[in-house]
Amino acid sequence: MANINDWLNEHGDYLYRFALARLRNPHQAEDAVQETMLAAIKSHSFAGESSARTWLTGILKHKIIDLQRKQIREQPLSDVVDLDASDTSMDDFFDKSGHWIDRPQAWDMPDNALEQKQFLQILSECMDKLPAKLAAIFMMRDVNELDNENICKALNITTTNAWVMLYRARMGLRKCLEMHWVTG
């Protein structure tokens, strides 16, 4: 087994960026990487069937999910906000018959790095405006690509509740992004 210091030197920055992109909190990202390294030291299960980076990233993904699950369970009731009661109403998107009032705009991926960086900054700000539980389920499903069954287990919610929450998160992000990024 390779020296853990070599792994930290070789993969530490990558793991930190990976965690930071998903957690959006530098301290939590650092903690997740540390927990990953501790788990790697304790497990002694690296068989070399994949690269060390792939193996460590797999451990990190589980640490991130555990952290998100813990945050949601420990979320104070006062932080839970009903999206329907906030400034993001679903009525803004649909007419009385349930059809789009304005179809979603086509979003082209920014061509240059500056525009992409600006977009990611606005996306992060929009994510911060979502209630924590909605932001977490969006991250789990659309960024971490977890399936609905694992999300429901992690958050201890029903499938229907998960789909409703994911829908609300996506609509809230859509509205925020269209207001702050997409020009008409």
Image: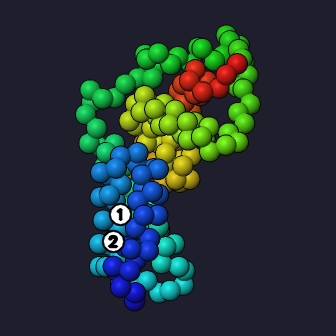
Instruction: Note whether 160 is above or below 8 in the view shown.
Output: above
Q: Given the image, on which type of amino acid does mark 1 rest?
A: Val
- Location of residue 138 in the rendering, given as x and y in whole percent from the top left corner: 51, 41
Please tell me how many numbered marks the rendered image carries.
Answer: 2
Q: Residue furthest bottom?
A: 1
Q: Is residue 100 left or right of residue 133?
A: right
Q: Quadrant of the N terminus?
A: bottom left
Indicate which disc residue 111 carries.
none
**Residue, x 54% and y 80% (percent of image)?**
50
**Residue, x 56% and y 24% (percent of image)?**
180
The residue that disc 1 covers is 33
- Cβ atoms under marks 1 and 2 closer than 8 Å: yes
Is residue 62 at least partly visible in the picture? no
Is residue 118 at least partly visible in the picture? yes
Q: Given the image, on which type of amino acid does mark 2 rest?
A: Met
Instruction: Note whether 139 is above or below 48 in the view shown.
Output: above
Locate residue 79: give its quadrant: top left
- Location of residue 9 in the rendering, given as x and y in whole percent from the top left corner: 39, 74
Label 1: few (<14), some (14–19) or many (≥20) C-alpha neighbours in 10 Å: many
Q: Quadrant of the C terminus?
A: top right
- Location of residue 86 in the rendering, given as x and y in whole percent from the top left corner: 43, 17
Marks 1 and 2 sit apart, C-alpha to C-alpha, by 6 Å
Q: Nearer the viewer, residue 34 or 156?
A: 34
Instruction: Note whether 13 is above or below 38 in the view shown.
Output: above
Query: Helix or strand or loop: what does disc 1 sit on?
Result: helix
Label 2: few (<14), some (14–19) or many (≥20) C-alpha neighbours in 10 Å: many
Query: Helix or strand or loop: what does disc 2 sit on?
Result: helix
**Residue, x 52% and y 16% (percent of image)?**
89
Q: Is residue 104 left or right of residue 64?
A: right
Q: Residue furthest top?
A: 96
**Residue, x 27% and y 30% (percent of image)?**
77
The residue that disc 2 covers is 37
